[in-house]
Image (cartoon, grey):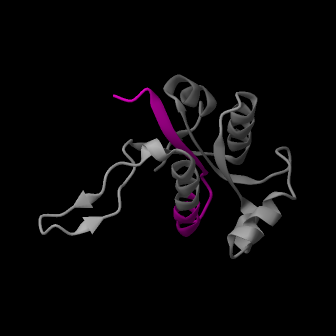
Amino acid sequence: MFDTKFVIVLREDLLAWQKLNVTAFLVSGIAGTNKELIGEVYRDADGNAYNPLCIQPIVVLSAEQELLRTIHRRALQREVPCSLYIEEMFSTGHDAANREIFAAFNPDDAKVVGIAMHTDKKIADKISKGARMHA
């Protein structure tokens, strides 16, 4: 049905609240830069309006730290735009602080806890190869 795939890969050892937090942030980054992913307003039977949602399923996978690092490298090598969340961002409280701490790390030393991408299905599968469905 879709030629593209929306994929999130989370580090498998995160606490439940961290997984939810990282997923929310990563989705916002993809949706914020891909307006075509957002559908129409939802209305219930009484006519109440609700915010539109993503038109495409989102696949959530998990991986160990080293595989997540590999997935990050693959995305960079293929120049696939992605959202990235690093471990140190858990210690900050707002966007400016997140960006400041993020800028202190390069791809080789960043402790990636989550990555998201929206790209061609085949490319997404190659990049995320080895990750498994989140349990």
Q: Residue furthest bottom?
A: 93
Is 86 in front, or is 42? Answer: 42
Residue 18's x, y, as percent? 59, 65
Residue 112's x, y, as percent? 72, 52
Is 132 in front, or is 44? Answer: 44
Residue 33's x, y, as percent? 57, 47
Instruction: Residue 7: say if magenta.
Output: yes
Is 134 in front, or is 28? Answer: 28
Is 48 in front, or is 24? Answer: 48
What residue is rendered at 26% in x and 66% in y? 49
What residue is rendered at 77% in x and 54% in y? 111
Instruction: Residue 13: say if magenta.
Output: yes
Q: In which quarter of the image is the N terminus?
A: top left
What residue is rendered at 43% in x and 26% in y? 3
Residue 48's x, y, as percent? 21, 69
**78 displayed left or right of 63:** right
> Which image quadrant is residue 103 in?
bottom right
Q: What stretch is highlighted in magenta?
A: 1-22
**33 displayed left or right of 95:** left
